[in-house]
Amino acid sequence: MLKHIIQKGYRNLILVALFFPLSALAQQADTLDILFVGNSYTYFWNLPQHVNLMAASQGRSFASRQSTAGGSNWEHHLKGERDLRSVELIRQEGWEYVVLQNHSMSTLNRLAEFRKNGKTLISMIRKAGAEPVLYMTWAREFNPLMQDPITSGYLSLAKAERVSVVPVGLVWAKVRALRPDLKLFDPDGSHPSPVGTYLNALIFYRFFSGAATAEIPNRLQTTDKDGEKTYLNFLTQNDADFLQQVVDEFDFSAYKF
């Protein structure tokens, strides 16, 4: 009897050893790997980390990283200028999605270059086995009319190359029209404020997950290297509820080509 129990226990240990790595691999497979390629419109207030925390709050696993440099455009990324390693990262890492955000004035001032470099990056991303996604930026605070050429530039590239667009700028325009009191902008009138970055993260979370944002907390927290609680963002519950409603009612399917 004792021998039988020992043998049975040994077999169970073998089964645990065999199935544990498979379970770990399954958990890794459930993680959505995303690379953000852009500039300060991406790194202001840690957009990729916001997206990860929002996903985690809903029981999802997103692993978002970034390759960014202030004021950079897609040509800088392609040439590896400003210490950017975007090409290397795209080619070497196993991303599911690579998000492309160009300089905020690129569609207004350098449209031909925008299209040429965008096409090159899109082709590179596809060859690496990832899906390219365009991050449509917003009009600057002083001139909401800038949104039309920004929208047109991103949509024309998306349709030509059959890639999806995350229409951040259009959601910003809607929020600004409905709630002009909300401070989406940094004092410079260009970059996102903490509220603007929270909105951006809601948009990306909904785009990638397809899930509603209504249960995402109005405070996003993480821990530092010492295990201390750290907050990335605070919003009032009313403002968070409003932004979530706008995002959840927006039709993202119209921008998936």
Image (spheres, grey):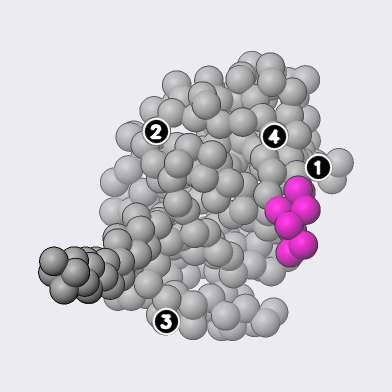
Quarter where residue 94 is shown: bottom left
Q: Quadrant of the N terminus?
A: bottom left
Amino acid found under the numbered disc labelled 2: Ala
Task: Name the residue carrying label 1.
Answer: 186
Amino acid found under the numbered disc labelled 1: Asp
Residue placed at 43% from the left, 61% from the top? Answer: 33
Is residue 236 magenta-colored? no
Distance between the Cα atoms at labels 2 and 3? 30 Å
Amino acid found under the numbered disc labelled 3: Gln
Task: Name the residue carrying label 3.
Answer: 92
Task: Name the residue carrying label 4.
Answer: 219
Q: Say which element carries label 3.
A: helix
Amino acid found under the numbered disc labelled 4: Arg
Q: Say which element carries label 1.
A: loop
Distance between the Cα atoms at labels 3 and 1? 35 Å
Judge by depth and name the residue closer to the eye, 59 or 38: 59
Disc 3 or 4, which lies upstream in sequence?
A: 3
Judge by depth and name the residue closer to the eye, 199 or 187: 199
Disc 3 or 1, which lies upstream in sequence?
A: 3
Residue 24 location (% of width, % of height): 35, 64
What are the residue bounds of the magenta stretch? 223-230
